[in-house]
Amino acid sequence: MSDPASTKVYPDAVSALADVLRDGMTLMAGGFGACGVPENLIAAVRELGVRGLTCISNNAGLDHFGLGILLQTRQIAKMIASYVGENKEFERQYLAGELELEFNPQGTLAERIRAGGAGIYGFYTRTGAGTLVAEGKEQRVVDGETYVLETGLVADIALVKAWKGDTEGNLVYRKTARNFNPPMATAGRITIAEVETLVEVGELDPDQVHTPGIYVQRIVAGRNYSRLIEKRTVRARAGSGDAVVA
Amino acid sequence: MPWSREELAARAARELADGFYVNLGIGIPTLVANYIAPGLKVVLQSENGMLGMGPFPYAGDEDPDLINAGKQTVTELPMTSYFSSADSFAMVRGGHIDLSVLGAMEVSEHGDLANWMVPGKLVKGMGGAMDLVAGVKRVVVVMEHSSKDGTAKFKPRCELPLTGANVVDLLITDLAVFSRATRRDPFRLLEIAPGISSQELRAKTPANYLE
């Protein structure tokens, strides 16, 4: 595609990770449930076999999908997440004391990642004040309101999934598959993006780019997306018209 | 007779006003969307990054890239917008969402809410609940008055770990509705389910409230 000496484009997920991924690293992985998950890159982490990883992700994947496949191989030592309800292997390892777990409120997790990527050491938030989440953290009372200090998060490698990307690493996400991917793209010392469609520069509308290419060091075209749906919910065709979500 | 799940959802829907941006939790709160009064413009926010959440898709139209915070397939509307999780919770924390309806395990007479963790049981995580109660302007809780074993859930103090301290504005149970004007006020009994006497309600409610 472009000059091979400076290209961000890698032929596949394994080659994008092989020379930088090490045991004990902190990884971020985008996605909410099964939506917007960097499946190809996670599969490559499994193939490369590194261990003792700390993974920052909203969820821990399903038993056979997303980060769940790294739990099966015991490659994850610690998870930082907001909700891990859909994974039996996670439950087993956690209850057996094999896996360390840190829960963050979802918005606090997102903002910690955003802050990390933006060079902000920490921020004071009302979220979690008066709860277990605040224990051991610096707190401030301003105008009668208690705020908890939460610190920014960065990762050795951030793995993100986008719908389209160009060879300069500009990314466009699709619908709710955006979720944690944009803040995580900013918070990786190395950010690797996988995209459903990789295009040449000039093919994306610059006004529509969600993640500017400066945040993305490596990009690969993903393959064989599972298109997995966790909870298929539909409405009857007859009647119900404008009835909203039930 | 205690109110049904559907009646609870319908009662919570009466808290919605025209132009409201609303976040609905999982369970009975999700049903509230079915009772939005005709002619009322209410925009549903889904904290995974969507404003203007539409109904479930028709079979065959499901899109794996389009889900709500409960991981269910949904649809978009002409006014829909998408954004990142960081933007989504900036919206929540910044007080831009008018109302949230959530379920609960316990509510205290001081408006504390517990709905994410039972010590000794496997904890799935708080998800976005702590952010919602900390940031949304008005928090409505819908829950059963007593748990399955008959233990009261509206009590002087929560025994379970909190989701938020002093965050509940309106409490709707299957026996009664309790409200308070501000978060400095005590709860006051507003409505009582048909056939439930105020003495019976008192007997089933360890929390203090005004009548």
Image (cartoon, coloured by chain):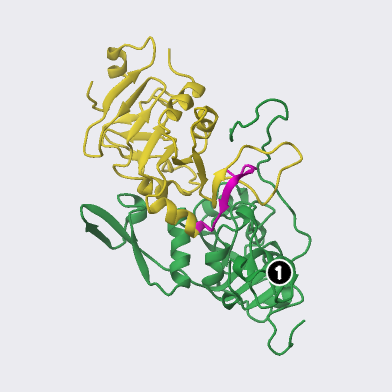
| Residue B95 position within the rendered picture, expressed as x and y whole percent measured from the top left | 37, 50
Residue A87 vertical position relative to residue A50 in the rendered view, above or below: above
Residue B103 vertical position relative to residue A51 in the rendered view, above or below: above
Per the rendering, the colour in which chain B appears is yellow
Q: Residues within 10 Å of mark 1 (few under 14, many from 20)?
A: some
Residue A20 included in the magenta stretch of the image = no
**Residue at (43%, 29%) from the top-left corner?**
B12
Q: How many marks?
A: 1
* Region rendered in magenta: B70-85
* Viewer can see residue B206: no
Quarter placement of the N terminus of chain B: top left
Residue A136, picture quadrant: bottom left
On what subunit does the disc labeled 1 rest? Answer: A
Q: Residue furthest bottom?
A: A5
Relative depth, front residue between B16 and A120: B16
| Residue B84 position within the rendered picture, expressed as x and y whole percent measured from the top left | 53, 58
Instruction: Chain letter for green, please.
Output: A
Relative depth, front residue between B50 and A121: B50
* Viewer can see residue A219: yes
| Residue A181 position within the rendered picture, expressed as x and y whole percent measured from the top left | 58, 63
Left or right for A193, reference A81: right
Secondary structure category for the residue under label 1: helix
Quarter placement of the C terminus of chain B: top left
**Residue at (36%, 68%) from the top-left corner?**
A122
Relative depth, front residue between A230 and A178: A178
Left or right for B201, reference B54: left
Residue to which mark 1 is pinned: A44
Left or right for A116, reference A67: left
Relative depth, front residue between A239 and B172: A239
Left or right for B201, reference A68: left
The amino acid at mark 1 is Ala
| Residue A191 position within the rendered picture, expressed as x and y whole percent measured from the top left | 59, 74
